[in-house]
Each structure stands twice: as C-alpha cells, then as structure tokens.
Image (cartoon, helix red, strand yellow):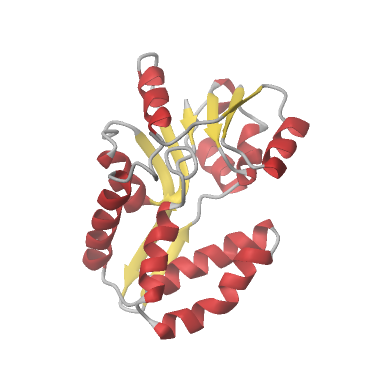
Amino acid sequence: ALFDMDGVFTRGDTMFELLRSQLLRSPLKIVRALPFLFRSAFGDRPTKTKANGRLMEIAVANLTQSQYTALVETTARRLAASKKFVQPDAVAEVKKHQANGKVLIITGSERHMARAYLSNLGLTDVDIESSELTFSGSGAKLTAHLIGPAKVKRLKELAIPFESLPFYTDSRADLPVARLTAHTTLVNPNAKTRDAYEHEIPNLTVVRWEAK
C-alpha cells in the first residue's frame, strides 16, 4: 500500500510547523520569504511547489546538518504527542496493510522529518520516499522535491508495481499518482479536492478521520 503523509497521518503539515518556527525567529528570513509566501498562497500548482521548496531552504539557511536534525527530532516529538495533530486512523490502516504486505510512505515532507515523525508514531518499519535537503557551507539546498508528478517518476524508478496498489492521500497534488493506482482513499478532503477526485478517479473511497 502507498500512503501520503501530511494530511493523512497529520491534521497539518509537518514541515510547515518547522518552517514557521524558524521564520518567526528571524525578521531577515521573513523578509526573504515574503515573495515566496505570496506565490505559495496564490500561485498555480507548479508555482506553489517551487515556492514551497524555496521557503524550506530559506527557513533552515543558517543551520548545519546536525542542528537541523536536532530541530527535526524536537519538532517531530512535539507534533506526534499532540492529539490535535495526529490522525491515529492512518496508523491503524498501515498496520492492517502490513499484515498483507509492505507499506511505502511517499511524501513531499523532508526525509529526516518524515522518518522522525513516523517513528514517534511507532511506525519504525515502513519504507519512506521523500524530499531531500542537502547541507553545505553555502546553506541548504532542496535536491529532491517529491510532489505530484515527481512521485510517479520516483515510483517508476523504484520499479514499484503501484498500478496494483491502494493509495491514501488528502491532496489534489497527488492526482498523478491516484490516476495510476488501483484504488484511492481520499482522507478529509475539502470540497474542491473531493470534486477533483470524484471527476477523475473511478475507484475512490472518501473517509473522514477525526483526531482522538
């Protein structure tokens, strides 16, 4: 089974929580981030994707790899401990699918964040494909951003037979994956997202999962 992470295992965005905390600590970072915040809010899908990538780089620009990893661990523990943030139904679905085969989490969140958050939910034995940040003396660079069509490309590169697998997501950005998978479970969608999926995806189940 394939799972998106943010919006499926969460009631928010893991990287947004980390980025917000970093931006609020630095007026200079906020100034640098403003044009990208605007594009993220009002741009089309490709513009949003590029803007979100730049926001990620700006927010962690002054951190070393070890500082970033420590920040991720702290943020992930805090989020995983929040009953308002976690969606435990997703964890239950993973365990159900693990009884019959492997589970792959394929997410736009960054690798360390995805692993730390899922581990704090007790999901230490799932495979993860994610976005990647690379750190160097000149700062952080987003070297892979696993959003939309990039997820399809990665699945094909891994030779995963995703056409026969169920897929769980909450996002319109994942329509390229949903078009190719055997069945899609759409988690807590807004009206526009639900309409888009119902228009394009024949094998669809819509669920409402609540925080507990």
In the rendered structure, the answer to whether residue 19 lies left or right of residue 171 reads left
Q: Residue at x 39, y 14 (%)?
A: 100
Q: Which residue is situated farthest in the right direction here?
A: 199
Residue 61 point in image, percent of width and height? 37, 75
Above or below, comparing residue 163 to residue 158 in the picture: above
Closer-to-camera residue (128/60) = 60
Image quadrant assignment for residue 59: bottom left
Image quadrant assignment for residue 138: bottom left
Quadrant (top left, top right, bottom left, bottom right) of the C terminus: top left
Q: Which residue is situated farthest in the top direction here?
A: 100
Q: Residue at x 33, y 68 (%)?
A: 135
Above or below, comparing residue 204 to residue 127 in the picture: above
Closer-to-camera residue (90/132) = 90
In the rendered structure, the answer to whether residue 122 lies left or right of residue 38 reads left
Closer-to-camera residue (1/197) = 197
Residue 173 point in image, percent of width and height? 62, 46
Q: Residue at x 78, y 33 (%)?
A: 199
Q: Residue at x 61, y 23 (%)?
A: 183
In the rendered structure, the answer to whether residue 69 lies left or right of residue 83 reads left
Residue 176 point in image, percent of width and height? 65, 40
User: How many numbered discs?
Assistant: 0
Residue 158 point in image, percent of width and height? 47, 36
